[in-house]
Amino acid sequence: MTGFWQGVVEPGFFSSAPVHSAVAVGAIVAVVSGMTGVFTVIRGHSFAGEALGDIGSTGGSASYLLGINPLIGFLGLSVLGAGLMSATGARTRKARDVETGIVVGGALGLAALFLYLDTTRTSTTGAPVTILFGSIFTVPSSTLPIVAVLGGVTLTILLALYRMLLLTSLNPGLAAARGTSVRLVAVAYLALLAVAVSLSAITIGTILSTALLIGPPATALRLTDSPGRATVLAAVIGVASTWLGILLAYDSDYWPRQHGWPASFLIVTIIVAGYLLARVFGRDIRQPAFG
Amino acid sequence: MIPTDTALISSDEAILSVEGVGVRFGTRTVLDEVSFTIRPGEFTGLIGSNGAGKTTLLRVILGLQPATGTVLIGGRPRRGRDRLVGYVPQKIALDPDIPLRARDVVGLGLDGHRLGVPLPTRRRRALVAEALDAVDATRFADARIGNLSGGEQQRVLIAHALISRPRLLLLDEPLANLDVRSEHAVVDLLSRIARDRRIGVLLSAHDMNPLLDAMDRVVYIADGHAASGPTDEVVQSDVLSRLYGHHVDVIRLHDRILVSVGRVDRPDEPSEHGPIVVP
Amino acid sequence: MFSTFYINTWYAATMVAFVAGTIGFFAVIRGSAFPAHALPQGAFAGAAGASLIGVNTILGLGVFALLGAIGIGVLGDRERHDVATALTFVLMLGLGAFFLSLTTEYAPEIYSLLFGEILGVAHSELLPIALIGVVCLAAITILYRPMLHSSFSPELAEVNGTSRRRIDLAFLIILGLVTTMTVPVVGALLMFSLTIAPAATARQFTARPALALALSILIALATVWTAIAISYETNYPIGFFVGAIGTTSYTLVKTVKGAYRRYASGRHVMTAAPAATT
């Protein structure tokens, strides 16, 4: 038995500091993303979730130029982006996505400009790639407290809004009849999404951010009818996928070719594989609300 | 015996012949042994409460939903695209900015299934104009479809269905979301279309009262079963009770019909909280 | 800026704008902003992989764009594709991360593929770009009516004999092909802006489909030509100008239109067309 265990977990895994950070940050982010993501999928806001990551990245690149903490730039611009997306007042999902596309287009254009200015000044040619792909193992352990606090705040607000979110997502007519301002909840939700996405994108990169936001919730919604159970399940699947990916990424340094596989690739593959399995073996979905 | 009129009409007269149609979703039986016919020029109401299976039945006739039993359109089984059938869905969620005028939507009903680009021939323009005129939509023919009111959009969709000269027109809950005046207008329009063009019109509704004057026959659906025939024959207490599987009162008040379904868990007693009234 | 050095970019940009404006007309009607955004980035991952193994980057772009299009089309649900798009997207980017991890070199080509560069188009690439463009335009012309019908109402088109699934897949594949020819010129991150913004702006001006399509192409051409011209003068990346022009022109037109509408309805008691539906 110990031989098998030794094969699965390569030496030094449990004592490695980067692994500790990765595991802790990854877990927090996976939980926040998974729980927020259930509503993202139900409401059909997947594009907004991805777009907010890109918009935030623009804020991040601006931060490098301005010399301020990238988290501030990221958060600031993504919340602004969420505000712009709410302001458009588009009613159908198609119209919403087109408007989101316009906003992201502007933001990415700015990102192109900022990165260009950044490289000519500091010649860090790897910047666009890093922002796009990110890496979970390069999270400094000093960010852990901020991540935990922000994550906790996001979750608290999410849980406070939970009932209203559920009602406005599944039955907006009834919600309006009961006096809940559907629009206000929508705006609050987008702002919350901006924070959740910023948190995950800046720590683990935009790819993983989107993957954890959409994948585990979509998988969970294929396995259970109840949104409540789906929320918990999404968090569990997210954390499990992240930890397994971290383990495999660490192990991959010891694999025959010895170049080490990136964690983002492994985690994403695990998440997508999980979704596909749920597609095949999960319940038959009739309502178009669930992805 | 639940009256059906299949025995009275030979199948080459009927434009639509539904026989023994059944649909199951998993363990749930949505439709069971549904049979009725529609003749050209007949205005038929498909009546039932929400969730009774009306939309499912329409989808079966359209070929969008697999089912047991037979559906004959113009005497032949349905194959792929059937030129004889026109369809008006309940509501299309429209992006208001979509670059299509009412005129363009109707044009798509004519040749949207053909490859290539639509050529602006005189004939095409005339056909579109005629269809728009038939539904009294000419005055907003050049307006953006997304800017029209619900009733106006619906008329455009009717024109969209009519332009390919169907012999059978199916409408899914056309009266839902309409105010009373628009309700009358649409029923009058459809009744006229059925008569003037000898088209069999089948429209679903959960309230049969707006249709009473125009309806020739009714297909009443409850609990997956159907009863069809002239309104006065089908909408009777004994018929509907057998259909629902428990006691049902049919109350005629002035010119309205109210169907009072007893509480479901105690089928033979009138309930203490009052009956569920299906108008 | 019209020297032989840069002329390739003008040729390529013109072809690209033409095709992007055309498919964009449909993309906006279908609300397919997310696939338009995701496919180029996924294709970029393929380009990274291709340059890794020394294959023509356009081939890498093309293969991944098509794989992405098929992924979205197959995984997509009847009603919506956004989850399928998100997951296909992250999977391709994940592969991209994997490819990039296999090399310690950082090819400068990568930057131009992301943001577009004025010298980013090699002469040898002109012919493949033109060919792909012709194929795309031919496909769109042939499928024009069923695609328009299905984009307006997939259900009604299905009843009339047009398979929703097939049109979905055809649209996505054409979008993938457009991606392949556009990314080398405008860059992966902003190609979608050239597809979405001109078409979104064009339809503010007219409800006539043929006119909206023509206007979409014209605006795309104007956008890309202006972007190249200013990029030449300032050296800033083309992608920035494409995004900036696209977003500002759309916002401007929409704001003016909204203000005009409020002004007009304030002046007149009854407007000709009734209020918008819910």
Image (tube, helix red, strand yellow):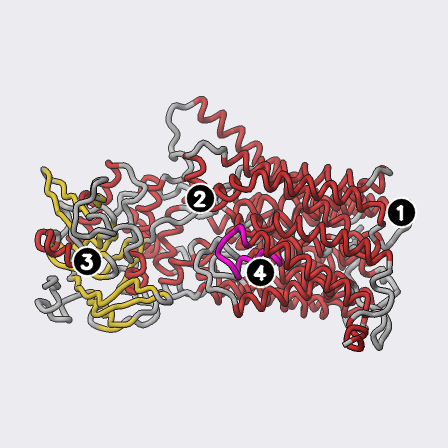
Which residue corresponds to mark 4? A219
Q: Residue at x 89, y 47 (%)?
A: A120
In terms of depth relative to the viewer, which is nearer, C130 or A174?
A174
x, y percentage for residue C220?
A: 63, 49
Residue C101 in sight in this render: yes
Mark 4 and mark 2 lie on one chain; the one further toward the N terminus is 2
Asked which quadrant contains residue B274, the reply is top left
Residue C226 in sight in this render: no
Residue A58 against residue C25 in the figure, above or below:
above
In terms of depth relative to the viewer, which is nearer, B225 or B229?
B225
Q: What stretch is highlighted in magenta?
A: A215-229
Which residue corresponds to mark 1? A120
Tell me whether the residue at label 4 lies in contact with that at label 1, contact meaning CB atoms closer than 8 angstroms.
Answer: no
Looking at the rendered structure, the kind of residue marked 4 is Thr
Few, some or many C-alpha atoms within 10 Å of disc 3 (few <14, some 14-19, many ≥20)?
some
Q: Which residue lies furthest to the front in this view?
A: A1
**Of helix, strand and loop, which one carries label 1?**
helix
Report the disc number at residue B245: 3
Which residue corresponds to mark 2? A171
Which one is in front in this view, the residue at disc 3 or the one at disc 2? 3
Looking at the rendered structure, the kind of residue marked 2 is Asn
